[in-house]
């Protein structure tokens, strides 16, 4: 059984951008990723990322600590079995975060930022085929693709320690971070 705990924080976009966003550095990491240009929520973008951030004054961050089913924790898995466990565990958290942020997005006149890559298209994203996003009204960019250092956010903003799969061993927990840019700046 998967268990979750949520954490919240608010920060000005200017402060977050200054301390946690590295647009150029993330662009290099994105280009090295084997999934580069495979999802509409990820780079490269047809807009200036700094301008995207700077349209808003405030950032609401929502983190979720997800404890995988105890039958998996501390055990080693490989290949498709490992992928299936990670998908089962992390997608549940992503769905919970996205659902909450979509509601706030409408109330706050903001834009949600997802935790990791989009999972809406179960049969694959249309980007590699040069087709437009099937669900453009539901797709949201993720924090990492917009240059955010999520690990630093987890440790500095939330005071938590991120854990990762190492050598196929499922950690005690994972932490997902999503956000909501709100309070648009006056033009």
Image (cartoon, grey):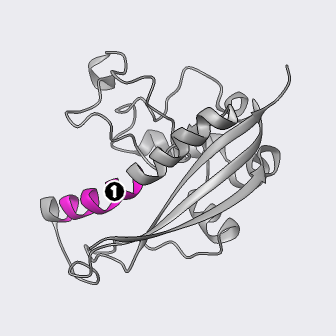
Looking at the image, which is closer to me, 118 or 145? Answer: 118
Looking at the image, which is closer to me, 84 or 21? Answer: 84
In the rendered image, residue 55, in percent from the top left (x then y), is placed at 75, 29
Secondary structure of the residue carrying tag 1 is helix
148 relative position to 182: left or right? left
113 relative position to 2: left or right? right
**Residue 146 showing in the rendered view:** no
Residue furthest toward the left?
A: 80
Magenta residues (range): 82-94
**Residue 42 showing in the rendered view:** yes
Let me know if residue 83 is in the magenta part. yes
Let me know if residue 43 is in the magenta part. no
In the rendered image, residue 48, in percent from the top left (x then y), is placed at 65, 25
- Name which quarter of the figure residue 84 lies in: bottom left
108 relative position to 27: left or right? right
**What residue is shown at x 28% (from left), y 81% (from top)?**
73
In the rendered image, residue 115, in percent from the top left (x then y), is placed at 48, 50
- Up the image or down, 51 lies above or below 180; here it is above
The residue that label 1 is drawn on is: 92
Viewport quadrant of the C terminus: top right
**What residue is shown at x 67% (from left), y 47% (from top)?**
22
């Amino acid at each position: 059984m998967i268990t979750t705990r949520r954490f919240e924080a608010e920060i000005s976009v200017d402060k977050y951008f200054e301390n946690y966003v590295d647009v150029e550095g993330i662009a290099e990491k994105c280009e090295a990723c084997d999934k580069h240009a495979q999802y509409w929520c990820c780079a490269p973008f047809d807009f200036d990322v700094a301008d995207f951030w700077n349209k808003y004054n405030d950032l609401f961050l929502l983190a979720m600590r997800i404890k995988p089913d105890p039958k998996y924790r501390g055990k080693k898995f490989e290949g498709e079995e490992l992928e299936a466990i990670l998908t089962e565990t992390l997608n549940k958290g992503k769905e919970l975060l996205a659902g909450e942020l979509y509601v706030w997005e409408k109330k706050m006149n903001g834009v949600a930022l997802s935790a990791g890559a989009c999972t809406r298209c179960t049969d694959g994203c249309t980007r590699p085929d040069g087709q437009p996003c099937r669900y453009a009204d539901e797709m949201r960019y993720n924090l990492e693709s917009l240059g955010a250092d999520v690990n630093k956010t987890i440790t500095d903003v939330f005071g938590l320690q991120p854990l990762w799969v190492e050598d196929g061993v499922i950690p005690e927990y994972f932490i997902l971070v999503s956000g909501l840019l709100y309070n648009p700046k006056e033009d």
